[in-house]
Amino acid sequence: MKEQNQTAKSHWDTCLQLIYNNIGEQQFNTWFAPIRQVDFDEEKRELTLCVPSSFIYEYHEAHYTKLLRFVLSRVYGQGVRLMYKVTTDATTGEGQTWEGSTTPAAKAVVNTIPANQAPQPLQTLDSQLKPEYTFDNFVPGDSNKLPLAVGQAIAQNPKQATFNPLFLYGPSGCGKTHLVTAIGARLKELHSEMRVLYVSAHLFQIQYTDSIRRNTFNDFIAFYQSIDALIIDDVQEFAAHQKTQLAFFHIFNHLHQNGRQLILTSDRPPVALQGMEERLLTRFKWGLLAELERPDEELRRDILRSKIRHDGLRFSDDVINYIARVVDKSVRDLEGIIHSLLAYSVVLNHPIDIQLAQNVIARTIGLQAQKHPLTVDEILDKTCTFFNLDREEVLSKSRKASVVLGRQVAMFLTQKHTTLSTTKIGAAIGRRNHATVLHSCQSISNRLKDDTAFSERIGELEAMLKA
C-alpha cells in the first residue's frame, strides 16, 4: 500500500510539472501550489485532491478543466475521476467534496477530511469604523425610518437571520455610510467579542488584486472568513469585475452559512445592478432590501440644526430654513454649505445672513437662490405639453407608444430634478411600482446616449422646466 501511495504521489508530481510548464509560475503558485493529493483509488480510477477553499475549486472548473483533463489522461490514463475536498473547519475537520468536470455529471456530497494544520490565532482587527458616525448623531426622519429601525435591531441582536444580509440602497449623500458605520459601532459596543469590519468595495477590490499579485490569496480569503459582521460600502463598484465578484461570492456564502452578519450598501437596488452575477444578486435579496431616500425639507432642517449645534455655531432660523429649502440633493451638500458659510463669514467679516447664504450656495453648488425646487406636477404638466399628450392618459394604463414615452420621460426627469424616491415617483405618476420607474429611467438614459436627436429634444424640455 505504501508503495502504491508513493507511486500515486509521483504521478501527481508529474502532473504538477506539466501544469507548471503550461501556465507559468505566478498562475501555478496561486492556483495549484496550495493543493495536495489526498488519495488515488486504482479500482475506482479516482484521484482526490485537497484544496484550501471552494473558490479554488470553482476557479479550476471555470479555467482549467481542459488542461486538467489532458494532464490526468496523459499521466494516469483515460477515465480518471477528479474529486476535490475542501476543508471548511480546521477544528472539526468537516468539509465538502466536489467532483471535477474532467468527468461527466459533477455533484456535491458532504464529507470530512482531516485538517492539515491547527487553527491560527486571529489577529487584532482594526474595524475601520469612523468614530464620528454613530446612532447618537444620525438624524431620524421619514426617509430613513425603516433602515434606522432595522439597523438598531441588528445591533441589538446580530444572531437573528431575518435581516441578513441587510442591503441598503439610495442616492449618494443620503446617509448610507453614516448608518452602516453606526450599526458597526453599536455592534462593537454591545458585543465586544465580535470582529466587525467596514470596507469600501473599491478597497476590497484592491486587496483582492494585490493578494493575487503577491500569491497571498488564501490569506485574503481566510481573513474575510474570520469576520463576524462584514460591512461593504458601494457594492455597485463590483460590477463588471467578475473575479472580484467570485471571491466575494465565496466569502458571502461562508459568512452567511455560519450566521455572520452582512451589511451592504449601493446607490441602486439589486434589480438595477448591471454587470453583477445573477447568483450574487439573488443572495443580495435573501435578507432585507431597504431604501434610504434623499432627505425631505423637514429632515434637512433637522440635520442642519444638529450639525450647527454639534459645531457650536449659531444660525438664524431664516438662514436654516432657506438652506433647507434650496439645498435639496445631499446631506454632504448641507455640511459643505455650513463650513463654507463659516469660512466666508470669517474672511469677509460678514454676518451669516440670507444674503451671504445666497452667495455661498450659488458659488459652491451652483443653485439659483430665487429658484424654487421643481415638483412632480410641474414636470408632468410640461412633459405632457411638450409631447402633446393628455395628462390623464399618461397617468392611465395606456400602452400606446407615444404615451409610454411621455410617461417614461416624466419619470426620468422627476428622478433627475427632484428628491423623490422611485417609490414616490411611481405613486405620483400612475401608481406604478419602483421597479417600473427604474426601468423607465434606464430606458430613457440609454436612449439619450444613442439617439442624438432625442437627446436634443429632451434638452429643449429641460430648458422649459428651468425657465
Image (spheres, helix red, strand yellow):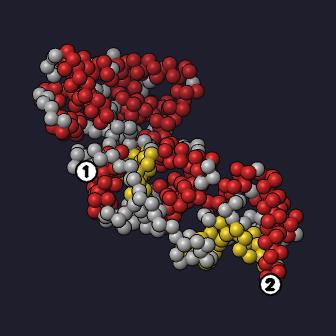
Specify the quadrant of the image occupied by residue 112: bottom right
Q: Along the line of sight, which residue is nearer the eye, 210 or 426?
A: 210
Q: Earlier in the sequence, mark 1 or mark 2?
A: 2
Q: Quadrant of residue 359?
A: top left
Which quarter of the rendering shows the C terminus? top left
The residue at the point 50 percent across, 31 percent down is 445
Q: Secondary structure at mark 1?
A: loop
Q: For the residue marked with disc 1, what is the amino acid?
A: Phe
The residue at the point 62 percent across, 76 percent down is 113
Numbered marks: total = 2
- Tell whether 252 sits left or right of 159: right
The circle on residue 1 is 2
At 29% from the left and 29% from the top, the residue drawn is: 336
Quarter placement of the N terminus: bottom right
Vertically, is 458 above or below 115? above
Q: Position of residue 45 (x, y in %)?
A: 81, 76
Query: What residue type is disc 2 on?
Result: Met
Proximity of marks 1 and 2: CB atoms separated by less than 8 Å:
no
Residue 135, which numbered label? 1
Residue 359 vertical position relative to residue 279 in the rendered view, above or below? above
Q: Nearer the viewer, residue 112 or 427?
A: 112
Query: Which quadrant holds residue 35?
Result: bottom right
Residue 145 seen: no
User: Considering only vertical position in the picture, is 77 above or below 275?
Assistant: below
